[in-house]
Image: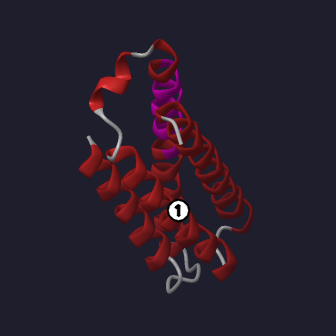
Amino acid sequence: MTQLETIQEHHALCDEIHQGVLDENRFLRQHQRAPDRALVERKHGLLEKLDRSLAALRALPAASVRDPATREQLEKTRARILQILQLDKENEQLLLRCSLTGGRATPAAAPTASVSMLQKIYARCS
């Protein structure tokens, strides 16, 4: 697999993660309670895929950033990651609000743990 293909696959995964975070946001706004098990399991599955994708990215040589097509793809991916983190922060606030207003607080711990794991993974890469 080429460097550009690896980055494009990572971007596709970021799009999938973004959709998952949007779905979680929609759920939190509509139901005003912690997400159900299906959403939490989906998020865990995406995090496992993200770990594998990041490992593949780490294996790429740093010189690949000089290629204009690769650089453009990286910028698109970084923009998507920022959108994910921003939405995820909003979801954390919604989860906190749900737990304070009497929503089911037990499942809320799992998504928060997933969020912190996602932030740690990206912190390792930067």
Q: Residue 66's spot in the image, x, y percent?
A: 36, 16
Highlighted magenta segment, given as a residue range? 72-84
Residue 121 in the figure: left or right of residue 102: left
Tally of numbered tags: 1
Front residue of this view, candidates 25 and 68 = 68
In terms of secondary structure, what is the magenta stretch mainly? Answer: helix
Q: Is residue 34 visible?
A: no
Residue 65: give x, y in percent of width and height.
36, 22
Instruction: Say which residue appears at 64% left-offset and 60% top-offset.
Output: 24
Q: Position of residue 74 (x, y in %)?
A: 46, 28
Q: Is residue 79 magenta?
A: yes
- Residue behind mark 1: 49
Q: Is residue 2 visible?
A: yes
Q: Secondary structure at mark 1?
A: helix
Label 1 crowding class (10 Å Cα cut-off): few <14, some 14-19, many 20+? some
Q: Residue at point 55% right, 80% down?
A: 102
Locate the C terminus and report the quarter of the image it occupies.
Answer: top left
Q: 78 left or right of 63?
A: right
Q: Residue at x 33, y 46 (%)?
A: 59
